[in-house]
Image: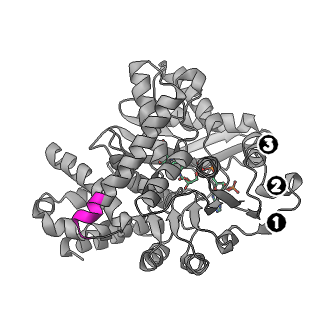
Amino acid sequence: MNAYVQRVLDTAIANNPNEPEFHQALTEILSSLSEVFDAHPEYEKSQILEMLVEPERIIAFRVPWVDDNGKVQVNKGYRVQFNSAIGPYKGGLRFHPSVNISIIKFLGFEQIFKNSLTGLPIGGGKGGSNFDPKGKSDGEVMRFCQSFMAELYRHIGSETDVPAGDIGVGGREIGYMFGYYKKIADEHTGVLTGRGLEYGGSFVRVQATGYGLVYFMEEMLLCNGSSFDGKTVVVSGSGNVAIYAHEKATKMGAKVVAMSDSGGYIYDKNGVDLEAVKEIKEVKRGRISDYLNYHPEAEYHKGCKGIWTVPCDIALPCATQNELDLESAEILVKNGVKAVGEGANMPSTNEAVKYFMEHDVLFGPAKAANAGGVACSALEMAQSGMRIFWNFDEVDSKLQHIMTGIFHNIADAAERYGKGKNYLDGANIAGFEKVAKAMMAQGVV
Ligand code: NDP
Ligand code: 2IT
């Protein structure tokens, strides 16, 4: 590896101890940039990497709220404003008990490059809380969201930092947070994306990450002599990204045979009935095991990792980070997988990614493949700014155009640096180039 890149990576890891997910993202991204620094000594002269690996600002705060039994609960809240070189900080909020600063920093760092790849003017940020919405009443979720926003509101704004959803944050949570922001800031602006259509949201935002993933993968497959048509697909997770990945892959002629949640996975050889999954997850907030109430002939297996033992042509990990490790990658390859598209953020371990590459599996890396959600968020920001609305088909066709464009952009970057079909390196390089140029132009800030 380029000596300067290696030095910055080692220092960043040493300076941020006990942050394994952040180390993993740093290693993955910086390892792709070696040849770029060999070719561009001006980047080293500006010490661009030392600037890039350090968040511009980290906000951490207390989130106290009162549960339905009248008991005070206290959670942690975070917003990492990582890089604003190409636009206001943009990225989701995650509410999940596993959330800590390492996870928010890995997500925020990834987001810089992802947002750059969309071609739209958005910087990188991420936030969240270790609050667990699972099993909470609507009243509890509302009180938590209001307390979270009572602190976050002073750090965000439509031209400063625009959060959105992620794991555990969907339309309900965005609604409660937006309502409270509006009350205390006294402005009805595009401060959050993923809003309801009735109060400033955009068509297609709900579907955008899943649809975008399939648009991206279809372009990658077509350029490699294949497509979704007639293929068997496994989609992990059963949340927002997974549901709409299933919907679009099915529309493209594929059959999705397995889905999961953190408790286990279902296998339905007839194709997973998406209407049943939507009712279980979107309406009832239930468990994927409830699928057997709709289709008793399907199989349910405890433990979510087992989903990767289901034979498929295309695997779409859409649940969470590090859900697909080397052992699962080996099983997928043994069972004949041809392509993997990351709907979740960093779902494959670095070892799994390496194994896929070595075994000629077409690999669509998260920061490119799942950029459709944030791209549609940027389209929501544009519509808010102009105070107009595009209809469903207009937004959908813009999304499709952006996702196919991202594929060609990263394939071109891979080509320029002699990386062949290593689209992971291509995505990291293409994402980096734009941010680096913007940072160089703006000086030491
Ligand atoms: P949701 O909360 O809607 O769904 C998350 C799904 O993943 C659920 O099925 C959940 O199961 C499962 N899951 C979560 N944590 C774990 C875990 N530790 N182990 C196993 N399964 C788990 O989130 P999204 O669909 O929005 O997000 C999924 C992934 O996509 C995340 O990595 C997110 O960062 C990424 N992403 C999301 C975007 C968006 O627009 N929403 C945009 C780009 C990426 P359970 O219900 O049991 O917890
Ligand atoms: O990881 C992601 O890109 C998201 N959770 C979406 C962020 C956004 O601002 O729409």
Mark 1 and mark 3: Cα distance apart in space: 21 Å
Q: Amino acid at mark 2?
A: Tyr
- Which quarter of the rendering shows the N terminus? bottom left
Looking at the magenta stretch, what is its main secondary structure? helix
Mark 2 and mark 3: Cα distance apart in space: 12 Å
Give residue 299's mark: 1
Q: Mark 1 or mark 3: which is in front?
A: 1
The residue pinned by badge 2 equals 291
Find numbered disc 2 in the image and state the secondary structure of the residue it sits on.
Answer: helix
Percent x, y of residue 200: 52, 23
Callout 1–callout 2 Cβ contact below 8 Å: no
**Which contiguous range is marked in magenta?**
412-418
Residue 59 in view here: no
Closer to the N terminus: mark 2 or mark 3?
3
* Residue 219 magenta-highlighted: no
Relative to 102, say whether 374 is above or below: above
